[in-house]
Image (spheres, rainbow, N blue to C red):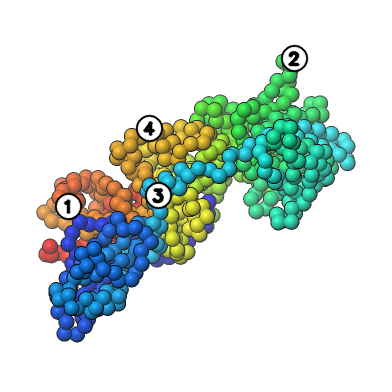
Amino acid sequence: MPFGIALAVLLVSGCAGEQAREPAVTQVWNFVSLEEGGNTVRVPIVPGMDPAAFDFRLELRRDVPLPVSDRVTRSSDSLSLVRMFPLGGGAVLALTASPADPGRMSLADSLLEQSVLVRWHGLRSVRLSDVWGDSIDSIREAPQKMPTLVINHSLEIAFTPADPDSSLVLTDTISFSGGDTVLLSAHPGVPGDFAALSGTVGRSTSAAGAWFCKAPEDSSSGGFLGVFSAVLPRNWHIYDSSGGGLLGRCRMNSLLLGGGYLPVGGGMNRFRIRVDAPHGMEVFCPLPTVFSEDGGAPAEFSTGAGLHRGVVPVFIGDFGTALLSDGRTGLAVQAGLDTAGVAADSMWADHMSSVLWSHLGFPGAVFSILVVDGGGDDCMAPYHGCLVVSPGVLSELAGVFVWGDSLAAGSPAAGVRVAVAGAECFTAQSIFLDPVLEDVIKAWMPCRFLDYMSDDESLFRMRRAYRNYYLHQTAVIGGEERALADPALGDSPLSDPVICGKGPLVMEYLYTQNCLGRLSLVLESFRHSGSYWSKIRANLGLQEGERRSRILRQFLYQPGIPQVETEWWEEGGQVTLSPRQMQSSGDFGILFGSCKVFLDDGTSRTVLLNEGREGILNGFLPPEAAGRVVAVDLNPDESIPADIVYRRRPLGSR
């Protein structure tokens, strides 16, 4: 999640789209300038030559097989020459020359070869990927090379704090199916001794000293089986400064296991955990409990047949519990913490969990929060269905009222990271959710929390901050921008500004268009594998071909955002706007139903717009708008993920 967003920079703004119109041809000094779709191609002219004798034409096309060469070639009729200029996003500018005299074909070839593409001055410099639409679906639907690996853990935890040499003993029986060797890693900072009771264990030479565990192949079962043990002493504390997570702590009166405290796979896991704790100490584990046969206290915790991402946090000690958000969220607080601080944390935890359940909660989802003494560290660690924090971290959410201003000033916005971490506890339960879509949802949740807690203007400022971050960073980094649905986006240099800048903007727009009312069902559906697009569309309740379905697909499957150049003018109590989308990828189908007009007396009014011929928008100024219109804004609430520039038509011109 980007916390520092530098916005005190003149951003590259732009427009985009294609218009069905004849290209303009004008002679400017020693070249002919042809303009189409916001791009200009300049063809050099030999002195004394009549340009009309060559019939230059420029066309924006998307039916040309890619990649294209910039060499001049003969067209299909053999009487014309053509040169292609790729624009990205599947678009190509085709420059054609048809000399009236066939004997001048060589001169036409030379003129086309020396022609230069001049992009519109406001167009973004980032090249849009040619992979979009159905091409992305074909990539996603390719057969998987390897089946999903599920690792089963049967974990015994024995906590004996009175023993200084072996206060904690972990014994994990690991099994998985398949014929390939699987490497499992534990955090290298965990103290104590790892040993293989069955199988092998050693240190990785390529993972900064992390442990790796290889279970030997069990030919009788057709899979792997290994038993690994870790003996840990008393009084240790591990904090991950890079991620801000408390990995573990062992004391006489409490034990916290988090992070990589045992060898675990980075993918899908199943756990069955049995805890042997001293009499009087309670055990917290965010898994369903397995009760003893006599109906007594829980003896075990288990994922059952469900899948689990990563490791499971376990806390042994004294703690108090409460229920938040109408009983849907469990809160566990270690005993002895500051009462006033815990009360503030509880209030903000209730607000956050209410927002998360409203947008991401699905049947079968769980969410709990564990507040533990961080030993002086400000720690926060999201797990599958559980958020572990130290006191005071949740109260950072109080900064929600100035998030947009903080981001716009280029400083970290306190509390944004908490909302993102809380969202991860939900998205992690959607086992097969696409990683990019998961990151987009997490980056979007601060907007929804701000909307829940603050006023509209604060939300508008935050949307603007995300948009400016996206436009600025992609321009600075440069290169090729991929669509949100493109699986290759996660490895792109532009992944962060696209996912964490454009992503929240797209989600906000889809939310305002009533496309995300059933987002929680998408998360539930991706607890199982299946098709990307059909799962998203069907679970959102959208029908193929309807407008909301088209909007969803356009913004997920097309690179970039709409770049819109808008010419406007005022006449006879009416404001008229002529917007046209100028990006080289496809039309995003943005509809402008209203705009805000700013008057020279310092007031502003909202005007409803009607669409006329050729996309022209008209709106009548209200009677009380006595002043002259000095500016217009088609996106006053910043909900449309678009880069819009305005040009006022000079008075008296047509």
Could you say where residue 614 lies in the image, as x and y percent from the top left?
17, 52
Mark 1, Cα crowd under 10 Å, few <14 / some 14-19 / many 20+, is few
Q: Residue furthest bottom?
A: 47
Q: Name the residue tied to disc 2.
A: 294
Contact flag, marks 1 and 3 (Cβ < 8 Å): no
* Upstream in sequence: badge 1 or badge 3: 3
The answer to whether one can see residue 525 in this image is yes
**Which of these two is toward me, 408 or 343?**
408
Up-down relation of residue 194 to residue 521 (above or below): below
Q: Name the residue tied to disc 1.
A: 614
Judged left or right of residue 381, residue 587 is left
State the CA–CA distance, disc 1 to disc 4: 32 Å
* Upstream in sequence: badge 4 or badge 3: 3
Q: Which amino acid does label 3 sit on?
A: Ser
Q: Name the residue tied to disc 4.
A: 541
Mark nearer the viewer, 4 or 2: 4
Q: Quadrant of the C terminus?
A: bottom left
Question: Tag 1's secondary structure?
Answer: helix
Judged left or right of residue 435, residue 299 is right
State the CA–CA distance, disc 2 to disc 1: 77 Å
Residue at 16 percent of width and 85 percent of height: 48
Judged left or right of residue 218, residue 591 is left
Could you say where residue 624 lies in the image, as x and y percent from the top left?
18, 47
Residue at 18 percent of width and 78 percent of height: 103
Mark 4, Cα crowd under 10 Å, few <14 / some 14-19 / many 20+, is some
Question: Tag 3's secondary structure?
Answer: helix
State the CA–CA distance, disc 4 to disc 3: 24 Å
Q: Name the residue tied to disc 3.
A: 135
* Upstream in sequence: badge 4 or badge 2: 2
Question: Tag 2's secondary structure?
Answer: loop
**Which of these two is toward me, 179 or 184?**
179
State the CA–CA distance, disc 1 to disc 3: 31 Å
